Image: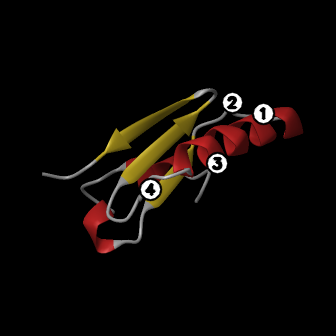
């Protein structure tokens, strides 16, 4: 899990080579509340879901998933 958006590049960091990559996409100067909200979204998404080999971009209230073909 990272705030570094570079890890959201599936060509450079192939998700299938990892146990899962989670990128928290927050405002440039995130507040503690924004970080907590992102974490809550992540925890809700992890319930019953395996992220092995996937890339998740977590935003406020939403998760975008990239699964390589």
Q: Position of residue 46 (x, y in %)?
A: 54, 51
- Whether residues under marks 1 and 2 lie with C-beta atoms below 8 angstroms apart, the answer is yes
* Residue mark closest to the camera, 4 vs 1: 1
Residue at the image point whose x is 70% and y is 45% from the top = 39
Q: Position of residue 57 (x, y in %)?
A: 47, 41
In this rendered view, identify the residue nearer to me: 10 or 59: 59
Quadrant for residue 61, please give it: top right
Q: Decide which of tag 4 and tag 1 comes sooner along the chain.
A: 4
- Whether residues under marks 3 and 1 lie with C-beta atoms below 8 angstroms apart, the answer is no
* Residue mark closest to the camera, 3 vs 1: 3
- Please tell me the numbered disc located at residue 50: none
Residue that numbered label 4 is attached to: 7
Residue that numbered label 2 is attached to: 27
In this rendered view, identify the residue nearer to me: 49 or 52: 49
Q: Decide which of tag 3 and tag 2 comes sooner along the chain.
A: 2
Q: Position of residue 42 (x, y in %)?
A: 61, 45
How crowded is the residue under tag 1: few (<14 C-alpha within 10 Å), some, or many (20+)?
some
Does residue 37 sit above or below 68 in this rendering?
A: above
Q: Decide which of tag 3 and tag 1 comes sooner along the chain.
A: 1
How crowded is the residue under tag 3: few (<14 C-alpha within 10 Å), some, or many (20+)?
few
Q: Decide which of tag 2 and tag 4 comes sooner along the chain.
A: 4
Quadrant for residue 14, please give it: bottom left
Which residue in the rendered view is the most extreme toward the right? Answer: 32
Residue at the image point whose x is 41% and y is 58% from the top = 51
Q: Position of residue 23 (x, y in %)?
A: 53, 49
Q: CA distance from mark 3 to mark 1?
A: 14 Å
- Please tell me the numbered disc located at residue 34: 1
């Amino acid at each position: 899990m990272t705030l570094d958006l570079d890890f959201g590049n599936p060509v450079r960091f192939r998700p299938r080579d990892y146990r899962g990559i989670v990128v928290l996409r927050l405002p440039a100067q995130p507040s503690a509340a924004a970080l907590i909200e992102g974490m809550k979204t992540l925890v809700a998404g992890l319930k019953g879901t395996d992220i092995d080999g996937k890339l998740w971009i977590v935003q406020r209230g939403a998760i975008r998933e990239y699964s390589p073909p």
